[in-house]
Amino acid sequence: MIERGTSKIAVSYLRVSTTKQMNAGADVDAEGNSIATQREANNAKAAAIRAVIQKEFVEPGASAQTISKRRKFKELLAYLAEHPEVDYVIIYMRSRAFRNLGDAVVTKRQLEGMSVKLVSAKEDFGEGIMADAMEAVTDIINEVQVRMSGEDIKVKMRHKAENGGTLGVARIGYKNVRIEHEGRQVNTIAVDETRAPLIRTAFELYASGDYTLSALYDKMESLGLKTRPTRRWKSQPLSISKLHRMLRDPYYVGVVTYKGEQYPGRHEPIIDQDLFDAVQRVMDHRSTNGQRDRVLYHYLKGLLFCDRCSTKERPVRVIYVEANGRGGRYGYFLCRGRQDRQCDLPYLPAADVEHAVAKHYATVGLPEDFVTYIREGMDAAVADSQRVKRELHDGYRKQLAALSTKEERLLDLATDGELPTAKIKERLRKVQIDKAAVERSLAQTVVDLDRAARYIRQYMELFEQPQELYTKADEATRRDLNTASFERLYIDEDGVRRDVKTPLLDELHEAAAAQQRQTARRRTPAGVLARSATTNVAPSPGAESDRQTVTHLLADLFGAGSSKGVMVPSTGVEPAP
């Protein structure tokens, strides 16, 4: 922070409306020529009014026409609330900050309430009533220009659509390119040679009627269909919702749609009309029959993998499907490799798979003495944490009461006129800032202090009688238990062959095994002699690593920084004799 001297303190706000403006001249300046130009003007204005710029806020490529939708401007206002030493906010032009009169008036009142003046680098309205009037007129003109520009853009977009031009960025399967046309460089759309064949495959697979959108998503993900990477987002698989929109979009047969009207596009079609119509018939048929094409819900969905395929180093999911039969619809689990004729795992009735998973929960259980040990340590840690939170809560309440008393005294002084108004105002602002900070801290401690304890206890209940708990649970609870216990379950006709546990459950089993090994060693004659000896005895091989296993698990469960430190005595998990 800059120390106040003879200079005033300012913050600078720089903004461009589009990413295109941000990229202009990026080879010269990383933030683009527009931002660099504004920065130069704002710095010059700061020097002219003898102010030092303390912080700069850059709003890159934000086309929002209202202040409420501009993230950096909201950060600027929050910064001013926390830094009462700031005197000016310098903007390049009022049109850069405000696109309508309403925002300009509201923002001006906010800044005046914080004793901050808004200064334009390119506009000098002077001081007084007429200056305020000129600012308002400028803001009105800016709003009119924005609205007129919006109407002009609508007309241009309609003309572009009527002439077959693409509106917006290229769809998946196409790419934006620049070509030379009649001696000029122009922007246009070209087929993405990498993604276009995959788009065609997606339409063909869905038109066959053998794929739901969920199954199509899995298939296209395995084939490598991904979105184009951008400066903000990495390339990622096409989501189910985007697949749905793509299959409904006539753009892929060479049609441009604008305001409900369709026009022949200038871009090259990826699929023909017959294939597009076939896809629409499948989607319409499923919609008419009330079939939920997007997702067939089952609480085991996403958890199951085919053990036969995995042994051949093909990690293939087992998906949930439904089929019509006598008496209604019946659920089955199907290996995705079977659809591609790469696996012979038969259709598995959903009820059989559910029973197999419930049976597998017998392997999740932990020894009763280990569960008791963990819960005792957990109760001690939670009690300690609750005590600290209560002390923090009481401390914040006392601070808040003291600040409220101080605020009331300052208001009394203002009423009596015993101190200069400017000085009282400055002190009040500091008290209000301090109160806001204390209230935020207080709000973070005003939570259910037993919430963490309840969560951990509920989690531990799983390991006492896991199979019984899972069997009695409803579907939603079963899904939660599966998420807490396993990352993958590999199944075959005879049930669950193996699993990949969650890291926490894996650590619990490893720690339980370590405790059992220590207990077994202590029951041997050598262990009894070692405990009865009055001198230090070197630990048996593996004992120290076992002790570290349990120690690390407890640190993970209870978190670092507990006043109780490590809850394992130096002699191991058993109390010293």
Image (cartoon, rainbow, N blue to C red):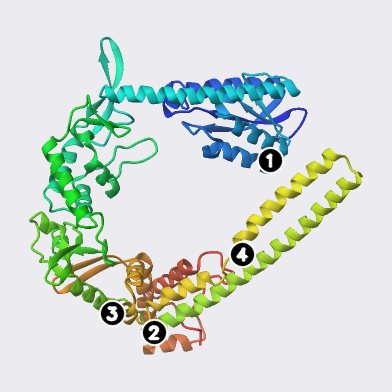
- The residue carrying pointer 4 sits among few (fewer than 14), some (14 to 19) or many (20 or more) residues within 10 Å by Cα, namely few
- List x then y, in percent, for residue 196: 19, 35
- List x then y, in percent, for residue 63: 47, 31
Q: Earlier in the sequence, mark 2 or mark 1?
A: 1
Instruction: Give the Cα separation between the discs numbered 2 and 1.
Output: 57 Å
Instruction: Give the Cα separation between the discs numbered 4 and 1.
Output: 27 Å
- The residue carrying pointer 1 sits among few (fewer than 14), some (14 to 19) or many (20 or more) residues within 10 Å by Cα, namely some
Which-is-in-front pick, marks 2 and 4? 4
Residue type at mark 4?
A: Val
Q: Is residue 393 left or right of residue 255?
A: right
Q: Earlier in the sequence, mark 1 or mark 3?
A: 1
The image shows residue 494, relative to residue 97, as above or below, that is below
Instruction: Give the Cα separation between the discs numbered 3 and 2.
Output: 14 Å
Q: Earlier in the sequence, mark 4 or mark 1?
A: 1
Mark number for residue 347?
Answer: none
Residue type at mark 2?
A: Glu
Pick whichever, 555 or 47, lies toward us: 47
Which-is-in-front pick, marks 3 and 2? 3
Mark number for residue 362?
Answer: 3
Residue type at mark 1?
A: His
The image shows residue 410, relative to residue 468, as above or below, that is above
Circle 2 is placed at which residue position? 368
Task: Please identify the residue farthest to the top as the structure is shown.
Answer: 183
Is there a contact, CB below 8 Å, between mark 2 and mark 4?
no
The residue under the point 23% across, 73% down is 354
Residue type at mark 3?
A: Ala
The residue under the point 88% across, 47% down is 415
